[in-house]
Amino acid sequence: MKQDSRALMRTWAIIAAIAVLMLLWISASLLLIGDRPPTWNYGQPPVVPGDSYYTAGRAPTGEKVPQQVPPAPQAREPAQ
């Protein structure tokens, strides 16, 4: 009976030690790093669909590109 209570107390002591270590870690992080907004401001990027920094202008428009993969036999229209 005494062994069981010692094991139970040791288990709770380990759990309490882990909780205290986590609280100390969080407190130290908050003190060292702080809770402040970032100092940089890059502005808001434009919300334009398909706009990219790497494009040199509009996409070239030309003739229609042929289909690369032929449709499956089930998808073809039946011959009349």
Image: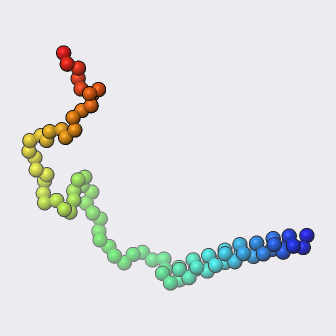
Q: Residue at x 16, y 59 (%)?
A: 55
Q: Is residue 76 left or right of residue 15?
A: left
Foreground residue, 52 or 43?
52
Residue 31 coordinates in the image, percent (x, y): 53, 83
Q: Which residue appears at 67% of the width and 75% of the height?
A: 18
Residue lying at the far left of the rendered structure:
62
In percent of width and height, residue 7 lies at 81, 72
Q: Is residue 69 above or below residue 45?
A: above
Q: Is residue 12 above or below residue 59?
A: below
Q: Is residue 74 left or right of residue 67?
A: right
- Please tell me which residue is depicted at 23% across the width and 20% down the height of the picture: 78
Residue furthest toward the front? 73
Q: Is residue 72 left or right of residue 66?
A: right
| Residue at left offset 19%, top offset 62% | 54
Quarter the C terminus occupies: top left
In the displayed structure, would residue 14 be above or below residue 55? below
Q: Is residue 43 left or right of residue 17?
A: left
Q: Position of residue 23 (x, y in %)?
A: 62, 77
